[in-house]
Image: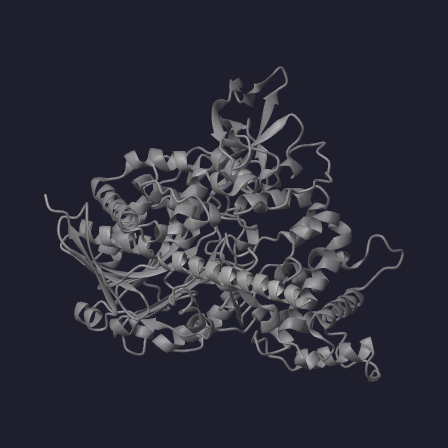
């Protein structure tokens, strides 16, 4: 027995030692890729020395003798901190993820190959003007210089992920940066999803009920603050495929959002203009944004970049500040192509049958046989499969779906707009920069300290007034009126400048009230936040930097304030008090809490959780019997739909009656049943004490590593989870995922916030939702995340002396000797 004990002890001890040594080796290898920010490197591609001065938050301040050298420095800094993120975005755009991840990303790669995103980016290189091309080449050289240093000094392959996947890194090319822009355009475009969802609903609903679920937004646009096309197509029990790994296409409700406010000098306390902006994107770790400052010949510029792109996308220069919001311009149309029954390689056109353009593409898949794809294209755009965007549910037999989309332009000059904005000296210069922007369509908010303006930037499709569906649902591609006639000139985009009210704002709300085809969109991203924005902006005669910060961080839900009295009007304070411990008593407690609640979506309160769960359960009870399995495509509460039902607009109260039952249910009945559903769900999840529930326990910000976040043992290290306030319809927006098992998780939020004050530009404020580094072992991986969660900001300076005085590391790049 003693001998057995000794050997058991030795084996266990040896195993623990080996395990410890293995962990130490893994940690050492991973730590090798942590960059040394206080180093001097000799690199190829520079004309003169470059300094990358980093402050305590790891924000690089880049100084060089020429603009090209400065762009080189930005590329080097991006590759120091986000090399894996950059290469992953490039592989996504190229449709080459499966070379690393195997069959789980094959459908993702297939979509990108069929769209031809990278091919369009490569073709667009020829469309760049000389200055933009010089910027792209210099930036690419900086990225490649960092890769060369990593290889030369064996610096841990540049990022720890490269130890788990192929360490081979192809040189960065100008086309790669253009492809990143196009990938972002795909991630910010939701009209295809909306078209298909609306079309599927139209197959099971009468027209008046379809208008309830997909209403046109009421009222005029706010900027200045003061069919049946395929008869015989039957509803299908279409089983949508599970979303593939690293799928770049968002749910239509998560296709981009943002807030931007601009205040003219006569409405500002310090008599100089103010601008605030918080673009909303899907949360991830690290965040998409990366803070940086560059010293160009035209002056300093500072703000948020995206790794892979050589421009400050949102921020300020010495003379101009700018912000972006998703415009929701309808720049996508699905056209259904009829196949020739005698020859399926042909499709119907107004002039007879025509051959598809075809191309073979070999998809290389790790640990599996390669797959050969036959890519087809009609005059209307690339042909997609039925499993992509759920198109199979609305495509008749003998037909295929093609996509018309501005993001597929082969003459994409969008990056020139970024360069021109950074160099702009006046507000008019900034507006002129929008001429070259193609996609993704955005609202650009501008101020030069004395004037304010907002402009739509991005090319509009030129649609025929006779378009059969007006782009609301897929339409026959052989009908001439359904085809695009090209793109409208940039001069057709609306501009709002120097309003009499002195304030401009956008929350992705409806901006124009013009008829089709000058409508911009039938589908907008917000109908609720704009109401709170108008209230906050107009309730004060003058604004300060702090009042704009308060607006960015505002967590009052106008939707909750308007819907709860409407839905609960016959439930509050009715009948006798119920005995303790009964479902009736639990309902009374919840209703008493909601009756005294002001709509504040605070992470510390139970009321936001009760409200959100009630509205979710209510909508499902209203639509489930009418839509069947399609109800799952509406996972988040639609306030306009609920309001139409409970105000009985155009007979919308019909949704309350359950089709399958013989009784006629009232809307009050459904509201009570839904509340009981919600409270039971919450009790099962969070316990029986209603007063102890917390919104923040359900509304965690899910900032997960897109590749390693699901790996046991690594998720704890790489994922960033934080309790957050706000909700789907607050200005401090935390869009919920809607999917079980965590339907209220915060998955889409303002991952960058900036506030720019021209009365004291150096007091401008910035923050991103994680940290600057993409390395999980770096202290800068999540150091800004807690500040972001608490609604705090950091300053960033354009003063070179201040930047150098506060430096915690300086990377010096020296040109190679001739």
Residue 83 is left or right of residue 472, and the answer is left
Q: Quadrant of residue 665?
A: bottom right
For residue 517, above or below residue 727: above
- x, y (%) of residue 642? 67, 62
Residue found at x 62% / y 40%? 390
- Marker count (numbered): 0
Residue 506 is left or right of residue 524, and the answer is left
The answer to whether residue 8 of the structure is visible from this angle is yes
For residue 88, above or below residue 288: above
Residue 493 is left or right of residue 134, and the answer is right
Q: Residue furthest top?
A: 342
Where does the C terminus fall, quadrant-wise? top left
Residue 597 is left or right of residue 516, and the answer is right
- x, y (%) of residue 164? 46, 49
Where does the N terminus fall, quadrant-wise? bottom right
Q: Nearer the viewer, residue 498 or 56?
A: 56
- x, y (%) of residue 96? 46, 38
For residue 147, above or below residue 295: above
Q: Residue furthest left?
A: 818
Q: Residue furthest right?
A: 662
Q: Nearer the viewer, residue 48 or 617?
A: 48
Residue found at x 77% / y 81%? 573
Q: Nearer the viewer, residue 670 or 654?
A: 670
Q: How is the image coloured?
A: one colour
The answer to whether residue 749 of the structure is visible from this angle is no
Q: Quadrant of residue 589?
A: bottom right
- x, y (%) of residue 401? 57, 32
């Amino acid at each position: 027995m003693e001998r057995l004990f000794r050997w058991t002890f030795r084996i266990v001890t040896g195993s623990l030692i080996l395990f410890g040594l293995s962990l130490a080796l893994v940690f050492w290898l991973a730590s090798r890729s942590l960059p040394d920010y206080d180093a001097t490197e000799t690199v190829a591609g520079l004309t003169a020395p470059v300094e990358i001065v980093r402050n305590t938050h790891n924000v690089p301040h880049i100084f060089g003798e020429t603009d090209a050298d400065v762009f080189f420095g930005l590329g080097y800094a991006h590759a120091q901190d986000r090399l894996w993120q950059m290469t992953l975005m490039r592989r996504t755009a190229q449709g080459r993820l499966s070379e690393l991840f195997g069959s789980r990303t094959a459908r993702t790669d297939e979509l990108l190959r069929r769209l031809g995103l990278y091919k369009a980016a490569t073709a667009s290189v020829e469309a760049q003007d000389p200055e933009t091309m010089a910027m792209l080449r210099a930036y690419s050289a900086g990225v490649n210089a960092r890769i060369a240093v990593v290889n030369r000094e064996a610096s841990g392959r540049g990022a720890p992920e490269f130890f788990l996947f192929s360490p081979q890194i192809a040189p960065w090319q100008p086309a790669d940066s253009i492809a990143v822009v196009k990938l972002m355009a795909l991630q910010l475009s939701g009209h295809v999803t909306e078209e298909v969802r609306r079309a599927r609903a139209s197959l099971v609903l009468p027209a008046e009920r379809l208008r309830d679920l997909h209403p046109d937004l009421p009222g005029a646009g706010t900027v200045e603050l003061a069919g049946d096309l395929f008869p015989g197509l039957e509803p299908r029990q279409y089983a949508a495929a599970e979303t593939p790994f690293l799928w770049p296409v968002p749910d239509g409700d998560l296709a981009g959002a943002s807030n931007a406010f601009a205040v003219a000098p006569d409405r500002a306390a310090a008599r100089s203009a103010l601008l605030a902006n918080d673009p909303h994107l899907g949360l991830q770790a690290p965040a998409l944004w990366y803070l940086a400052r560059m010293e160009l010949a035209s002056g300093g510029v500072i703000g948020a970049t995206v790794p892979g792109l050589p421009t400050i996308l949102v921020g300020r220069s010495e003379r101009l500040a700018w912000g972006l919001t998703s415009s929701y311009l309808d720049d996508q149309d699905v056209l259904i192509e009829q196949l020739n029954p005698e020859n399926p390689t042909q499709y119907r056109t107004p002039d007879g049958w025509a051959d598809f353009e075809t191309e073979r593409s070999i998809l290389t898949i790790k640990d599996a046989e390669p797959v050969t794809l036959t890519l087809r294209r009609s005059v209307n755009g690339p042909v997609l499969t039925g499993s992509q965007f759920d198109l199979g549910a609305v495509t008749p037999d003998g037909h295929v779906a093609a996509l018309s989309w501005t993001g597929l332009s082969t003459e994409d000059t969008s990056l020139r707009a970024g360069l021109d904005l950074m160099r702009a000296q006046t507000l008019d210069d900034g507006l002129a920069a929008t001429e070259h922007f193609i996609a993704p369509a955005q609202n650009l908010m501008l101020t030069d300290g004395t004037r304010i303006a907002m402009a739509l930037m991005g090319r509009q499709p030129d649609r025929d007034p006779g378009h059969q569906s007006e782009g609301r649902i897929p339409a026959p591609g052989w009908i001439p009126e359904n085809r695009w006639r090209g793109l409208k000139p940039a001069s057709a985009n609306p501009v709002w400048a120097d309003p009499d009210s002195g304030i401009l704002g956008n929350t992705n709300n409806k901006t124009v009230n013009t008829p089709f085809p000058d409508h911009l969109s039938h589908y907008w991203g917000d109908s609720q936040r704009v109401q709170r924005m108008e209230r906050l902006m107009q309730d004060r005669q003058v604004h300060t930097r702090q009042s704009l910060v308060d607006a960015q961080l505002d967590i009052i839900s106008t939707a909750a304030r308007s819907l709860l009295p409407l839905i609960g009007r016959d439930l509050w304070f009715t009948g006798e008090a119920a005995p303790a411990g009964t479902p009736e008593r639990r309902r009374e407690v919840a209703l008493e809490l909601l009756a005294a609640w002001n709509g504040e979506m605070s992470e510390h309160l139970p009321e936001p959780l009760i409200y959100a769960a009630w509205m979710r359960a209510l909508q499902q009870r209203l639509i489930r019997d009418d839509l069947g399995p399609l109800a799952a495509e509406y996972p988040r509460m639609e306030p306009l739909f609920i309001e139409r039902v409970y105000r009985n607009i155009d007979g919308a109260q019909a949704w309350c009656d359950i089709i399958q039952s013989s009784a006629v249910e009232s809307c009050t009945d459904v509201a009570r049943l839904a509340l009981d559903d919600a409270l039971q769900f919450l009790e099962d999840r969070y316990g029986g004490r209603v007063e102890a529930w917390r919104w923040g326990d359900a509304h965690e910000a899910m900032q997960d590593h897109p590749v390693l976040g699901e790996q046991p043992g690594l998720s704890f290290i790489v994922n960033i989870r934080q309790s957050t306030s706000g909700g789907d319809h607050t200005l401090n927006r935390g869009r919920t995922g809607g999917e079980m098992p965590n339907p209220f998780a915060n998955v889409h939020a303002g991952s960058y916030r900036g506030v720019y004050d021209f009365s004291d530009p150096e007091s401008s404020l910035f923050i991103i939702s994680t940290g600057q580094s993409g390395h999980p072992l770096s202290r800068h991986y999540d150091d800004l995340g807690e500040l972001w969660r608490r609604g705090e900001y950091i300053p960033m300076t354009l003063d070179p002396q201040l930047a150098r005085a506060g430096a915690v590391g300086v990377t010096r790049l020296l040109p190679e000797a001739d």
